[in-house]
Image: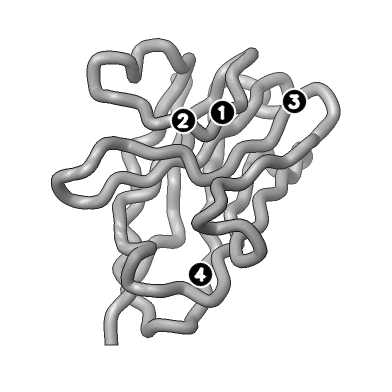
Amino acid sequence: QVQLVESGGDLVQPGGSLRLSCAASGFTLAYYAINWFRQAPGKEREGVSCISSRDGRTYYADSVKGRFTISRDNTQNTVYLQMNSLSPDDTAVYYCAADLYRCTLTVVPENRLYEYDYWGQGTQVTVSS
């Protein structure tokens, strides 16, 4: 069965850290660009980071640059998102998406989610004191 599974979301205090995981089964993650998106209540899904498949280049939205780090472990078929210095503005459901070509930081409306090959179910990150 082909699927992506996110994990690692939690309730954390401002200034804290979390590491999210995006684990693939049924396909080889190394061949895909992996995008991390987040969606806060009432907002569209926005790209926060991605890592390309070809050269491992990483990209970050301005809002997370310097605080988030994306990495991949091909031996574990998993991509990680290390999130430091978290603030309440980071509160959202975080999704990973795999695509053979797309490594973008765009906003993706619901009616365009199909453009990505695979999506995970999301993991909740809540930053609150």
| Kind of element beneath mark 4 | strand
Badge 3, how many Cα within 10 Å: few under 14, some, many 20+? many
Q: Which residue is mark 3?
A: 53
Label pair 4/3, CB-CB below 8 angstroms: no
Q: Going 48% across and 83% down the picture, which residue do you hit?
A: 15
Q: Going 53% across and 43% down the picture, which residue do you hit?
A: 22
| Kind of element beneath mark 1 | loop
Kindly report the distance in space between the C-alpha atoms of the residues bearing marks 2 and 4.
23 Å
Q: Quadrant of residue 5?
A: top left
Kindly report the distance in space between the C-alpha atoms of the residues bearing marks 2 and 1.
6 Å
Q: Which residue is mark 2?
A: 106
Q: Which residue is mark 1?
A: 104
How far across and how far down the image is residue 99, in percent?
A: 56, 19
Kindly report the distance in space between the C-alpha atoms of the residues bearing marks 4 and 3.
24 Å
Q: Tell me the number on the disc at residue 18.
A: 4
| Kind of element beneath mark 2 | loop
Q: Nearer the viewer, residue 72 or 110?
A: 110
